[in-house]
Image: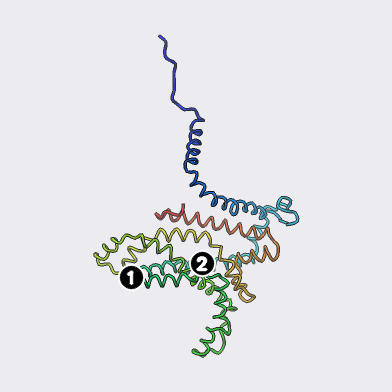
Amino acid sequence: MEHPPMTTNEPTRSLPAASSFARVWKRLLKEKYLFLLLLPGLLYFIVYRYVPMVGITIAFKDYSPFLGFADSPWVGFKHFRTLLGSSEVVQVLWNTLAISFLQIVFAFPAPIVLALLLNEVRSQTYKRIVQSIVYLPHFLSWVVVVGIVFIFFRNDGIVNDVLRIYFGAEEPIRFLTEPGWFRPFIVAEVIWKEVGWGTIIFLAALSGVDPHLYEAATIDGASRWKQMWHVTLPAIRSTIVILLILRLGDVLDTGFEQIWLQLNAFNMGVGNTLDTYVYYKGIQQSDYSFSTAVGLFKGLIGLILVVGANKLAKRFGEEGVY
């Protein structure tokens, strides 16, 4: 008796890859217009974000513009050893961390507090007026903001005039040259300029809170303060965590323009941060390799902080950013 030939339905190894490619290609053809919309954004990131990353190789070279990228000699981690062994860089790093820490402690919670306060306002007209007023400073450039600060706080400015006329101050307070005033001014300016704009995300998160939760809390006898503590804050906790993680990624970015506009010979010791230091070394002294090493160091620290904070957030039950 002859047996029929053995047949098998098991696909060969190349079939799944081929079928996957066919599915992807079919989907690309089907949604081609949707992917065309994606193309400009994709090109932007490739041209302006990924291609320039090739330039970080000069952090491992003694780059000379006359020799170019290819012919400049490789020096390994020389600039990173200089970065970590320089007392000047340690002082600059300390200044950067101090300003970032103050901004996280005071500037980061400010939009949350303002959003909670606005959320308690029952008059929509009054709420919109306040929102419009606090949004406006965001649209001013740092040049304008620092100019306003100079007008108000210089030795013969309005604030010193008020202190002299109404409080009998004999000597003007040197707000703009005393090193002790530099960091408080930086943080206060950030709060004034960005607090209104920062409330947008938190107000959007608050608009999604279920009103029935407040009704249930009211029936249980919870006061407005307890409703805010037990209903409102937990509702926006994940938003706060995500924004805090993203903020930690920029912990070594204190903003070049704001600080550079206010630096002078008197406050250089407490105000020279990594951003301004890179400018002085890279642009004014043409030390491109060292300034690139500083920039790469900043990026690595930010990446480590984001990954660490994200894992910590997930350990405490939050979603994190990825």
Residue furthest out toward the top? 1
Q: CA distance from mark 2 to mark 1?
A: 35 Å
x and y percent of residue 181 in the render? Answer: 55, 77
- Labels 2, 1: front one: 1
Type of residue at label 1? Arg
- Residue at point 54%, 58% (across, down): 302
The reply to whether residue 180 is visible in this rendering is no
Can residue 321 be seen? yes
Horizontal side, residue 226 vs residue 12: left or right: left
Residue with the most extreme right position: 66
The residue carrying mark 2 is 101
Does dot 1 land on a helix, a strand or a loop? loop
Which label was assigned to residue 282? none
In the picture, residue 260 is in which quadrant?
A: bottom right
Reading the image, the residue beneath label 1 is 122
- Classify mark 2: helix, strand or loop: helix
- Which residue shows up at 53% across the image and 89% down it? 164
Q: Residue at x 29, y 69 (%)?
A: 223
What amino acid type is highlighted by mark number 2? Phe
